[in-house]
Amino acid sequence: MLLSLVFCVGCVSLARERLADNLASAMLNQDDPETVRAGAPAYLLLIDGMIREEPDDPGLLMAASRLYGAVANGLVSDPERARRLTARAREYARRAFCPAHHDICNPQQDNYQSFVNAVERSDPGKLEPLYIYATSWAGWIAARGNDWSALADLPKVEYLLQYIVDREPGYHNGRAQLYLAMMRSQLPPALGGKPETGRHHFEQAIAHSRGRDLIAKVEYARRYARLVYDQALHDRLLGEVLQAPAEAPDLTLSNILAKQQARRLLEDGYF
């Protein structure tokens, strides 16, 4: 009887995780952004309610972080809403990752080297919790672009993403490479930047997604080609985005949004 009860509890927990993953997947594979914008609040409230029932389930917390991050980073234009949603995404990721990695999450690791030492000592193990923790942190920082205390954490996030690609270069179909590419394409050479390092990561992101992740080409054009004033590369990349099919597993919504951004970038008269 006890074994059956434990089994049933495990079944319920697994069902919740699968439902949360299916919600996130349904959103990412939707080809109408307006449908997702209209439905996203219900998704978020539903997954919040599931977490109230199972507040310490790492799988459920990671799925919730993914969902909140996707809404905040792709579908929200209001800065204050983006800050709130990214805060929730980061908090769920922290609750999934930190119980097993107290040393990394210790707020006393306030300087870069002590943080690096903590990561090296603890060996985070599985990459998915670390990736969700790092990317939710990156999204949280991006939503607070004028907050210098938030921006001060960028080197730590960059280190975590480098840690991931050092172990699995194509992780998450190149998305870890894409995050690094965007981080490393912020300054021109005249100001000490190394945009060619960013270019390498953009190329890796495109290669590992086999060209299906169109936002990689949009960001390559926006963050690298514009930075080095390469109009030919800029226009080629955005033209490829507009010509490519949008449908791809877990990338359809992102690709539809990428096409919309590509049109705007080609029409804004930057060059």
Image (cartoon, rainbow, N blue to C red):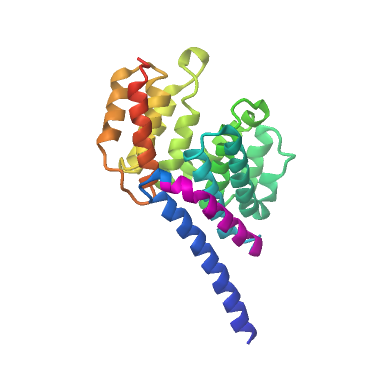
Q: Position of residue 266 (x, y in %)?
A: 33, 24
Tell how many labels. Answer: 0
Q: Quadrant of residue 79?
A: top right
Q: Position of residue 208 (x, y in %)?
A: 35, 43
Q: Is residue 47 above or below residue 233?
A: below
Q: Left or right: 243 with respect to 7?
A: left
Q: Residue furthest top?
A: 190
Q: Left or right: 111 with respect to 12?
A: right
Q: Quadrant of residue 253?
A: top left
Residue 46 drawn in magenta: yes
Q: Is residue 271 above or below residue 52?
A: above
Query: Which is the main secondary structure of the residues drawn in magenta?
Result: helix
Q: Position of residue 104 (x, y in %)?
A: 66, 45
The residue range painted magenta reads 35-53
Q: Residue furthest bottom?
A: 1
Q: Position of residue 47 (x, y in %)?
A: 57, 57
Q: Residue furthest left?
A: 243
Instruction: Please tell me which residue is depicted at 61% across the width and 60% down the height of the picture.
Output: 49
Residue 75 drawn in magenta: no
Of 120 and 140, the residue lying toward us: 140
Of 118 and 60, the residue lying toward us: 60
Any part of residue 202 in sight:
yes
Q: Residue furthest right?
A: 108
Quarter holding the C terminus? top left
Instruction: Please tell me which residue is depicted at 41% across the width and 44% down the height of the picture.
Output: 33
Q: Quadrant of residue 16?
A: bottom right
Quarter holding the N terminus? bottom right
Instruction: Please tell me which residue is depicted at 50% across the width and 63% down the height of the picture.
Output: 19
